[in-house]
Amino acid sequence: DQQVKQNSPSLSVQEGRISILNCDYTNSMFDYFLWYKKYPAEGPTFLISISSIKDKNEDGRFTVFLNKSAKHLSLHIVPSQPGDSAVYFCAASGRSRGSTLGRLYFGRGTQLTVWP
Amino acid sequence: GAVVSQHPSWVICKSGTSVKIECRSLDFQATTMFWYRQFPKQSLMLMATSNEGSKATYEQGVEKDKFLINHASLTLSTLTVTSAHPEDSSFYICSASGWTGNTFGSGTRLTVV
């Protein structure tokens, strides 16, 4: 049962434009969300996160938006650069009873390609 | 920042042999270590969770006798794939949970021939 879903396996964007990566989740107990960037044959690297008490978090070119009522979050990258080309994973964690603190649930990832 | 060193980065082994993957947290104590597996074009799937000094908790469908996890100290956890078969070929990643949150290792590409 996929509790975190990234329905777009790929996204292609021209350099300088905005990249928007989407993520949906089903478990209402999730209260912390993260985005990871991953290159082939490497482990994921943390990009940005957001707590459920916020609806927006910004870090340089990266902004994450959270819509709790829709159980939806998105990552905006602007302006997009060729070096941003990678697989982006959305992840979620929760502190519900019985859950393991720190355990992450991942989406399947979206391959972002930024072309010049 | 927090660093997790994972070795080896890739390994090829013969069917029936065992492979050990090691993860070390270099500058922090990892109270919990998560082991994930990723098949091509799939998400990272949690295999097991281990806390230092205690037995690992395995996710449903993961054979504990096949994937042996040892978390002997707050800085070292190992995953041993015993009697490996071609279907075990995958990308294995550890994640150490500490005061900085989750830090991932660089992953191990296992190919069983």
Image (cartoon, grey):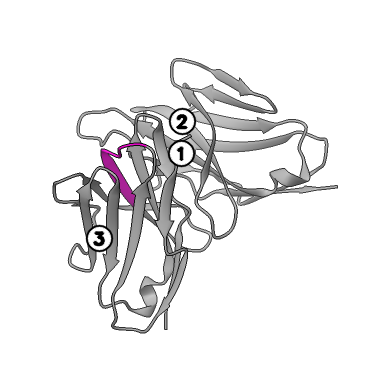
Q: Secondary structure at mark 2?
A: strand
- Residue B73 screen position, x and y as percent: 22, 47
- Residue under label 1: A91
Q: Is residue B31 magenta-colored?
A: yes
Q: Nearer the viewer, residue A19 or B105?
A: B105
Chain containing the residue with disc 2: A
Query: Quick check: can you spot residue A1?
Result: no
- Residue under label 3: B61
Using a 10 Å C-alpha cutoff, classify the residue at mark 2 as few (fewer than 14 neighbours), some (14 to 19) or many (20 or more): many
- Residue under label 2: A33
What residue occupies the far right of the structure in this picture? Answer: A116
Give the alpha-carbon distance from disc 3 to disc 2, as whole Å: 26 Å
Give the alpha-carbon distance from disc 3 to disc 1, as whole Å: 21 Å
- Residue A45 screen position, x and y as percent: 53, 43
What residue occupies the far left of the structure in this picture? Answer: B54
Q: Is residue B12 magenta-colored?
A: no
Q: Secondary structure at mark 1?
A: strand
Residue type for callout 2: Phe
Using a 10 Å C-alpha cutoff, classify the residue at mark 1 as few (fewer than 14 neighbours), some (14 to 19) or many (20 or more): many
